[in-house]
Amino acid sequence: MGNQPTYPPNPPSPGAPSPYGQPPQPPAPGSGTPYGSAPTPTQQSPRPKWKTALLATGAAVVLLSVSTGTAWFVATTGTPGGGITAFGDGGGDGAEWDVPLPNAGSWDFTTALAFGSWLTDKVVIRAQKDGVLAYDLTSGKRSWGIPSPGAQLCGATPDLSGGKAAIAYGSSNSCDHLAGIDATTGKLTWKIKIPAEKSNLANSINVPRIMSAEGVAVTELDDAVVAYRLSDGHKLWSAAASADDGCHIKDINTAATRVAVILDCTFRGGTRLQYIDPKTGKITKQATLGQLSLMTSLLSASPAIIRSESGGQNNFTVYSDAATKVTEFKTPEVDMLAMNTVAMVNGLFEQRRYTIHGDRLYLATFPENVPQSMRSRNKALAYDLKTGKQLWESSGTHDTILTYVRADDQGLLAVETGDRRDLAPRLIRLDAATGKATELATLPQKYGTEAEKARVFERNGVVITVPWTSVATRYAVTYVNTKS
């Protein structure tokens, strides 16, 4: 396959030519805006520049989508080609560093749209629209970078598996290639062409959903599921719902050793839950489901949790490893909006505000305004998956938005996002049994709201925030060692 282009350890100095045919980098932070001046028209990258067009009617925003993929209605400038946009060098002393986000504060929410973020022992990695960038955890210096092999990235596996991941890429109207990444070396290890659904609309693109199991990348598009080996891109199996039988895939999710699918077959036995072996494609378990609402999603593959919404009320059904029903319970309206999109995206694997550990399901209420303040707040809800009972409700330690980091035996680790004016973000823990909130650390005031729609990692007191888009954010990555 040959050597893939990678970034030098540090970005070129302002005004210096890029090794990939890029224009000179914008001036360093401190000149122009607080985050560096935007390039002049003559400095703009030859790559296409995409902007999502949202149609606003009164107070409502109408978001457009097509078929089962993503619809990005965009305006383009420039010509195809070029390399990845250098975000700059985080720098830092090992206690705190950050990477400025291009176009922060503007209405261009898609330039730095992230499709995935991954953490290793040495680097934090951001897979974004124009490529993949890795930053050294200690210094914040850029360790490596891979420009998008095509005009743009259009997807990524949510997590690493054995230090490997997959990205999807393509042209302005087709997301039709998959590539493997070795997170240790920063190299593309393979590239293949994959089935794709081209859009019939100008300036739009349909994106396949990409998920990961143990050593496997799983894609789903247009009622077809295909699995590829992460080590070499070898196609392991494929399965397609048959329109002739009136079947279609309602939703899909993955776990380390399982692909779970809700298959709706109107004329062939109704709706079914299927467990599939990710390495062989064989159906291992199957269960017949009852009538499901149009708003139905598969929150988890292991355990399998199906959520249906109707009339503002949610119904959750939990299934065992044998695909038998464990429990079914209802909840008030909860926040299930995707955090990783700026438009309605059916193709991307949606990242939502919930997490699961053992027999606990942690949900979040919809945000509401805090009186006499310019911020919002939500509450964490804990449910017992064996009984369906609500265990507790918690607002944390302050009135603000809670973003979940992870759940473990001790409870729920979360970030109170705060704001940049008068409430610093905090790392907190909510007790698994009682929901009692304990503050673990206070983060710098300037990072308030950065975690509101972001992937947040925590390891040994280090908090790393990687926002999905530039909405309410200024940084592509923030790193805070709360013990320093």
Image (spheres, helix red, strand yellow):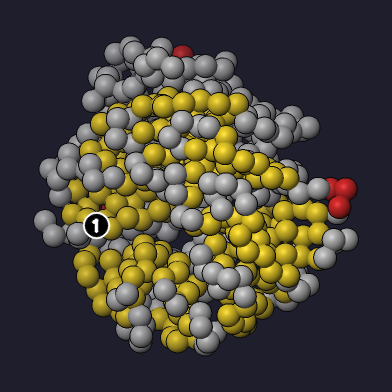
Q: How many marks are shown on the rendered structure? A: 1
Q: Nearer the viewer, residue 149 or 343?
A: 149
Residue 348 in the image: above or below residue 1: below
Rendering quarter of residue 160 = top left
Q: Amino acid at mark 1?
A: Arg
Visible residue check, residue 313: yes
Rendering quarter of residue 209 = top right
The quarter of the picture where the C terminus appears is bottom left
Rendering quarter of residue 269 = bottom right
Q: Residue at x 40, y 53 (%)?
A: 455
Q: Residue at x 86, y 54 (%)?
A: 246
Visible residue check, residue 335: no
In-image side of 368 versus 464 (left or right): right
In-image side of 156 versus 242 (left or right): left
The quarter of the picture where the N terminus appears is top left
Residue 272 in the image: above or below residue 477: below
Residue 60 is situated, as x and y percent measured from the top left of the image, at 68, 58
